[in-house]
Image (cartoon, rainbow, N blue to C red):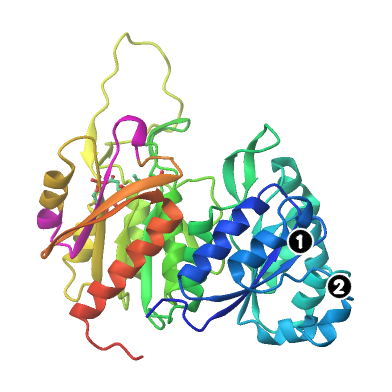
C-alpha cells in the first residue's frame, strides 16, 4: 500500500519563484498515494498557472474566496474540514505574516484559520527578508502554535544572492509529510544524541577541534523527535539552534561530553553518537596565553574517554549507534569500529575530497551491523536523518520486541 494512501493534503501555493517546485511536490504527494487539493493565492498564479496544478491534482484549483461556483463545490469551510494536513509551499513572507496575525483576507489564509488540521509551511524568500526581525518574530509565533516550519534551505537564490531562504526540494518536503503521518514509532522511548565537535583547550585562547558543524547530529535529533522519541541532544560548540522541543546540553570538551552522557544515560533506550569527539586532549591547559618565545613547542596529549565504547560496555546498554568518518577504506575501518566498540550499528560516511560529510548540507551513509551493509545513498542531511531513523527503529524493535502499536 502507498504510504500516504487515504491522506488528504491541502496544498497552498503563494507567490514566489519557488512556486514552480510546487508542481513537482503535488505530483510527489500523489505518487505516495495522497489526495491533493490546491489553493493558489493571486500572486502564485503569476508564477505558475492553475491549469498545471489542476492537471496534476486532477481537481479544480481554488483561488477566489468569493467564487460563486463554490456554493456548489468546495468553499473554504469545506476545504478546511476536508484536509488532514495543510501544507503551504512556498510560503511567502506576506503569507507567513498573515498566518501569524490571523489575517484572513484571501482563500488560503481564511481556510488556514478555519481548519483544525495541522499546518506545515515551507518558507521561500530572499535571504534578507528571511533574516528580518519581523519574519523571524512571525516564525516564532507560528512555531509556538505548533506550526511545522520546513526549512528554508541555504544556497544560491533566484535573486542572485546567497543565503537562507530557498524552499526545500519537493522530495525533502514530502519526506517531512510522510514523517508526520507515520506512527510515533519511538513514543515513550528515551534517546540521547551527541553532536558537533569538541574543543580541547591548550590555553585560554587556543584549542584542538575539528570541522564538525553539528548539522548531521542536529538533523538526526530532529528526526528521532519526529518519530515520537524523548530526545536529549548533547552538543559541542556549533552555530546551530537545537530542533524544536529537543532539550540540548551544551558542552565544550570530550570530558564534559562524557560526563553529560553518563549523567543522563540511565533509562536511555537508544544512544546515537554523531559527535566528532577529539581522541586526545593536551595533558594540561595553561591558565595564561602561551607566549611565542621558543622556536619549537611540543604539545603532550593524553587519550580522552571513548564515550560510545563506555556506553556500549554498560551492564544494561541502550541500543548503541556510532558514526565513522573516514578518509580511506571507509567500510573496513567502520567494521573495525563496530567490533572494537561493541556497538549495535555504525553509520559510515566519507570525509575526503569534495564530498566530505563535515560541514556540508548533504552526506552519504552506509550502515553496517552484524547482518551486513545497507547503503542509504547521498542526499540532504535532513532526508538522511529520517532514513536513518527508520533503520534504527526497525533494528531497535528487532532486538527489543515490545512495540506497542
Ligand atoms: O557535524 P557535521 O558537519 O554535520 O558532520 C557530521 C560528521 C561527519 C561529524 C558525522 O557524520 C560523523 O561522522 N561523526 C563521527 C565522526 C568521528 O569522529 O568518528 P570517529 O571515527 O572518530 O569515532 C567513531 C565513533 O565513536 C563516533 O560515533 C564518535 O562519536 C564516537 N566517539 C569517538 C571518540 C570518543 N572519544 N568518544 C566517542 O564517543
Nearer-N-terminus badge (1/2)? 1
> Residue tagged by mark 2?
104
Rounded to the nearest angstrom, the CA distance separating label 1 from label 2 is 12 Å
Pointer 1 with pointer 2, Cβ within 8 A: no
* Quadrant holding the N terminus: bottom left
Local secondary structure at mark 2: loop
Residue 35: percent from left, percent from top: 56, 77
Q: Residue at x 46, y 44 (%)?
A: 361
> Residue tagged by mark 1?
96
Q: Is residue 131 above or below residue 81?
A: above
* Quadrant holding the C terminus: bottom left
Residue 358: percent from left, percent from top: 38, 40
Choose between 62 and 259: the one closer to the eye.
Answer: 62
Instruction: Give left or right: position of 157 versus 323.
Output: right
Instruction: Give left or right: position of 131 versus 306.
Output: right
Residue 253: percent from left, percent from top: 38, 46
Please indicate, yes or no, whether residue 380 appears anywhere in the rendered image: yes
Q: In which quarter of the image is residue 218?
A: bottom left
Choose between 358 and 373: the one closer to the eye.
Answer: 373
Which region of the structure is painted magenta?
338-356
Choose between 240 and 310: the one closer to the eye.
Answer: 240
Amino acid at each position: 500500500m502507498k504510504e500516504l494512501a487515504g491522506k488528504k493534503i491541502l496544498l497552498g501555493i503563494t507567490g514566489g519563484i519557488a512556486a514552480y517546485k510546487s508542481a513537482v511536490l503535488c505530483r510527489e504527494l500523489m505518487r505516495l498515494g495522497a489526495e491533493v487539493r490546491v489553493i493558489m493565492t493571486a500572486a502564485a498564479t503569476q508564477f505558475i498557472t492553475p491549469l498545471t496544478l489542476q492537471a496534476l491534482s486532477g481537481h479544480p484549483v481554488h483561488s477566489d474566496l468569493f467564487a460563486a461556483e463554490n456554493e456548489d463545490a468546495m468553499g473554504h469551510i469545506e476545504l478546511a474540514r476536508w484536509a488532514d494536513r495543510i501544507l503551504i509551499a512556498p510560503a511567502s513572507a506576506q503569507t507567513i505574516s498573515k498566518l501569524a496575525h490571523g489575517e484572513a483576507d484571501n482563500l488560503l489564509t481564511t481556510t488556514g484559520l478555519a481548519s483544525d488540521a495541522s499546518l506545515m509551511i515551507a518558507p521561500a524568500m530572499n535571504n534578507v527578508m528571511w533574516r528580518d526581525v519581523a519574519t523571524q518574530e512571525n516564525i516564532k509565533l507560528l512555531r509556538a502554535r505548533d506550526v511545522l516550519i520546513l526549512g528554508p534551505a541555504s544556497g544560491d537564490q533566484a535573486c542572485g544572492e546567497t543565503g537562507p531562504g530557498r524552499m526545500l526540494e519537493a522530495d525533502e518536503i514530502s519526506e517531512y509529510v510522510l514523517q508526520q503521518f507515520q506512527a510515533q514509532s519511538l513514543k515513550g522511548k528515551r534517546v540521547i544524541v551527541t553532536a558537533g565537535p569538541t574543543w580541547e583547550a591548550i590555553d585560554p585562547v587556543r584549542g584542538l577541534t575539528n570541522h564538525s558543524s553539528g548539522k548531521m547530529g542536529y538533523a538526526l535529533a530532529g528526526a528521532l523527535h519526529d518519530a515520537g522519541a524523548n530526545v536529549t541532544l548533547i552538543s559541542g560548540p556549533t552555530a546551530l539552534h537545537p530542533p524544536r522541543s529537543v532539550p540540548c546540553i551544551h558542552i565544550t570538551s570530550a570530558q564534559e561530553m562524557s560526563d553529560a552522557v553518563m549523567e543522563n544515560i540511565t533509562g536511555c533506550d537508544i544512544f546515537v553518537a554523531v559527535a566528532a569527539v577529539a581522541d586526545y586532549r593536551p595533558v594540561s591547559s595553561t591558565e595564561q596565553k602561551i607566549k611565542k618565545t621558543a622556536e619549537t613547542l611540543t604539545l603532550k596529549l593524553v587519550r580522552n574517554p571513548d564515550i560510545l565504547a563506555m556506553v556500549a560496555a554498560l551492564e544494561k546498554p541502550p541500543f548503541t549507534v556510532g558514526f565513522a568518518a573516514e578518509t580511506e577504506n571507509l567500510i573496513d575501518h567502520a567494521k573495525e569500529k563496530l567490533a572494537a566498540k561493541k556497538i549495535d550499528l555504525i553509520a559510515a560516511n566519507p570525509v575526503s575530497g569534495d564530498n566530505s560529510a563535515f560541514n556540508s548540507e548533504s552526506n552519504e551513509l552506509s550502515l553496517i551491523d552484524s547482518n551486513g551493509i545497507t547503503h542509504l545513498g547521498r542526499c540532504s542531511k535532513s532526508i538522511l536523518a529520517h532514513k536513518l531513523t527508520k533503520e534504527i527503529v526497525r533494528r531497535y524493535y528487532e532486538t527489543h520486541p515490545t512495540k506497542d502499536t
